């Protein structure tokens, strides 16, 4: 090592952290395409921070100024449209990656012991992202912002005894107003963002303590070679660092294609109703949530009872927390458990169907599919403890399934 | 695994790796540079800010001997309706030899203002009312003998005592080094208005 490197290593924890988390962190060699999502989420977090910061430079958090400041960014600020679209499209792409990341965890049993806390922390991050997206959604103070804010904050009213007080506290008044913008901006820019960053760091540290799972659900640490490293493992650096860099390139290509050629992504990432200013006297003809919250909304409105619907939605959102303890099969990965895999694929398809239904108008023709969808969603979690104990399970191999390419 | 080829430092694998690393790093740096351009450009003054850059001042309410101060690009512009007596003091002050830069050699004004009036039209003085010592706003003191017994009229800065004549030319003994700056402007005596357009690039405000 050079003189400076020795001097530095004596004084800084960074070299040993590099070794522990990158150069000597042995990850399974059979990662598939799903495994790009984690590093891509980190990349997107950086993008959201940079684009969000540059938007904040021009944003005015008052009822009179917010909408004009946001459209000022679109029209007057040099490359403001680029930064704005990057930020908005970034939100939807983050949720896409989150769902991919969670689906991977469910398919391969990444939530199983000893990784239960990695799953729990990750799920908290998902909820934090939902909060972050919601607060950001209100800030442009378009009519969609106003009414989405009104509807979501009125959910708090259903809390027994303190509901009204909590709602007033969240809104800063009896209705959404400039005061709401101030506190939502503080939450969006400072509090929830910092919470997400901190939780992501903790999430990775917890993962690195137990080691990564893999599509075969085999613990690679149980099969160590003569050098003490797992035979089926490869050091994260340089193998996955370089591979993830390649993944960044492909992803940025997709990201750029969306921003430059279809920035609203068929008005799914950025709804049409964002382009009129807030009007307290004129609520929207269509009330639809953003696509990434739509499945839960579909479940909420499938129950024709206000508190019933809210309780179902909360149960649906919170059920995945206990997933590690519902799955009682000794084998982790659904590659060896056909029944659970089929249930899981039905769960995913159902989630997508619920997302579609949530975007439709509240007409009777959709009530039955929505109720069915809610039943399937809840049913998956209720059935899993029994199915996992009873299903025919193949024995996983000792070595991971891997073909060099 | 990866350590085997370290034995021969110029083996094809090592040189390949070095080349690929250098190539990826260089292209990565180029991409990062290109991406940085719009991010930094977004911090430039917006079109809205640039639209606020000119100010139109109506001259009709300004009576002879009066000053008017108007806001232009967040700076005070002073317009003085100079009387014949005031214009005469400009020669007197030059004769006294108390001006540091009577011929306006330091380019604190646009070329069309490089004269003893430091204006397009002698009666109408249009300047930036900022003392070029430490950026305070000097007081307009037209009355003879007000600031000092020999005072013929001009501007006097309350912060550190810099003194200027009625063309905002700096008087010797002032901490301010230069004459007060003059912005670029147009004057229309039929419409009785002055439009202050932009800063004269060579002038130093303070």
Image (spheres, rainbow, N blue to C red):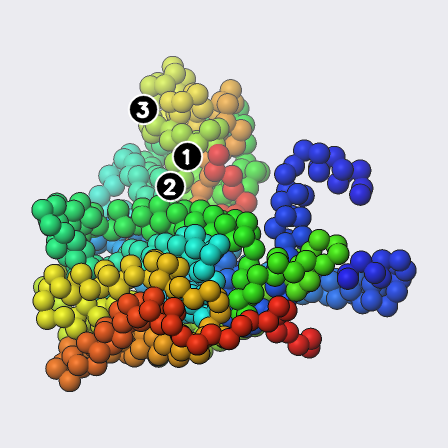
Q: Measured from the top left, where is residue B149 in percent x and y?
A: 38, 14
Residue at numbered disc 3: B143
Figure quadrant of residue A292: bottom left
Between the residue at mark 3 and the residue at mark 2, the CA separation in whole angstroms equals 25 Å
Residue at numbered disc 2: B75
Label pair 2/1, CB-CB below 8 angstroms: yes
Q: Do callouts 2 and 1 point to residues on the same chain?
A: yes
Figure quadrant of residue B130: top left
Q: Residue at x 40, y 40 (%)?
A: B127
Question: What is the chain identity of the residue bearing mark 2?
Answer: B
Residue at numbered disc 1: B130
Figure quadrant of residue A78: bottom left
**Which quarter of the figure is the C terminus of chain A placed in?**
bottom right
Q: Measured from the top left, where is residue A151 in percent x and y?
A: 17, 61
Between the residue at mark 2 and the residue at mark 1, the CA separation in whole angstroms equals 8 Å
Assess disc 2: are there few (<14), some (14-19) or many (≥20) residues with their C-alpha within 10 Å of its C-alpha.
few
Q: Visible in this render: residue B35?
A: no
Helix, strand or loop at disc 3? Answer: loop
């Amino acid at each position: 090592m050079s003189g400076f490197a020795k001097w530095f290593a004596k004084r800084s924890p960074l070299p040993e952290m590099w070794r522990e988390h990158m150069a000597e962190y042995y990850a399974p060699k059979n990662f598939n395409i799903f495994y790009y999502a984690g590093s891509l989420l980190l990349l997107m977090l950086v993008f959201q921070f940079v684009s969000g910061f540059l938007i904040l430079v021009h944003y005015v958090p008052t009822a009179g100024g917010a909408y004009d400041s946001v459209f000022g960014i679109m029209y007057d600020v040099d490359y403001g449209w680029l930064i704005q679209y990057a930020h908005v499209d970034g939100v939807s792409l983050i949720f896409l990656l989150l769902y991919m990341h969670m689906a991977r965890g469910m398919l391969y049993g990444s939530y199983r012991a000893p990784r239960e806390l990695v799953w729990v922390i990750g799920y908290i991050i998902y909820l934090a992202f939902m909060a972050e997206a919601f607060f950001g959604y209100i800030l442009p103070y378009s009519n969609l912002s106003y009414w989405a804010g009104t509807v979501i904050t009125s959910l708090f009213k259903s809390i027994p005894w303190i509901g009204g007080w909590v709602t007033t506290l969240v809104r800063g008044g009896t209705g959404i107003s400039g005061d709401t913008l101030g506190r939502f901006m503080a939450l969006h820019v400072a509090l929830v963002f910092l919470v997400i960053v901190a939780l992501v760091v903790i999430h990775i540290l917890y993962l690195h303590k137990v080691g990564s799972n893999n599509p075969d659900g085999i613990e690679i640490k149980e099969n160590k070679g003569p050098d003490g490293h797992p035979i089926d493992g490869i050091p994260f650096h340089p193998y996955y660092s370089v591979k993830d860099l390649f993944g960044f390139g492909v992803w940025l290509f997709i990201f750029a294609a969306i921003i430059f050629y279809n920035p609203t992504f068929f008005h799914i990432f950025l709804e049409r109703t964002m382009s009129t200013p807030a009007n307290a006297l004129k609520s929207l003809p269509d009330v639809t949530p953003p696509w990434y919250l739509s499945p839960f909304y579909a479940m909420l409105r499938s129950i024709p009872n206000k508190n019933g619907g809210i309780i179902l939605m909360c149960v649906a959102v919170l059920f995945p927390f206990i997933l590690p303890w519902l799955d009682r099969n000794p084998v982790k990965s659904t590659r060896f458990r056909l029944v659970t895999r089929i249930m899981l694929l039905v769960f995913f398809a159902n989630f997508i169907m619920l997302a579609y239904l949530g975007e439709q108008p509240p007409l009777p023709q959709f009530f039955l599919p929505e109720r069915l969808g809610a039943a399937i969603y809840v049913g998956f979690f209720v059935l899993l403890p029994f199915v996992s104990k009873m299903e025919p399970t193949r024995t996983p191999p000792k070595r991971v399934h891997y073909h060099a390419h | 695994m990866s350590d085997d080829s370290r034995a021969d430092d110029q083996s094809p694998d090592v040189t390949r790796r070095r080349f690929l690393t250098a190539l990826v790093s260089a292209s990565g740096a180029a991409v990062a540079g290109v991406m940085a351009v719009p991010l930094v450009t977004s911090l430039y003054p917006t079109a809205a800010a640039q639209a606020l850059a000119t100010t139109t001042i109506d001259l009709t309410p300004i009576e002879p001997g009066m000053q008017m101060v108007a806001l232009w690009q967040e700076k005070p512009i002073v317009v003085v309706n100079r009387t014949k007596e005031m214009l005469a003091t400009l020669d007197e002050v030059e004769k006294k030899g108390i001006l540091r830069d009577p011929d306006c050699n330091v380019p604190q004004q646009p070329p069309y203002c490089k004269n003893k009036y430091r204006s397009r039209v002698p009666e109408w003085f249009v300047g930036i009312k900022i003392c070029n010592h430490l950026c305070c706003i000097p007081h307009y003191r037209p009355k003879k003998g007000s600031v000092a017994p020999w005072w013929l009229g001009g501007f006097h800065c309350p912060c550190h005592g810099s003194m200027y004549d009625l063309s905002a030319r700096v008087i010797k003994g002032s901490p301010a080094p230069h004459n007060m700056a003059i912005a670029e402007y147009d004057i229309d005596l039929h419409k009785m208005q002055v439009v202050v357009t932009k800063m004269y690039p060579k002038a130093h405000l303070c």
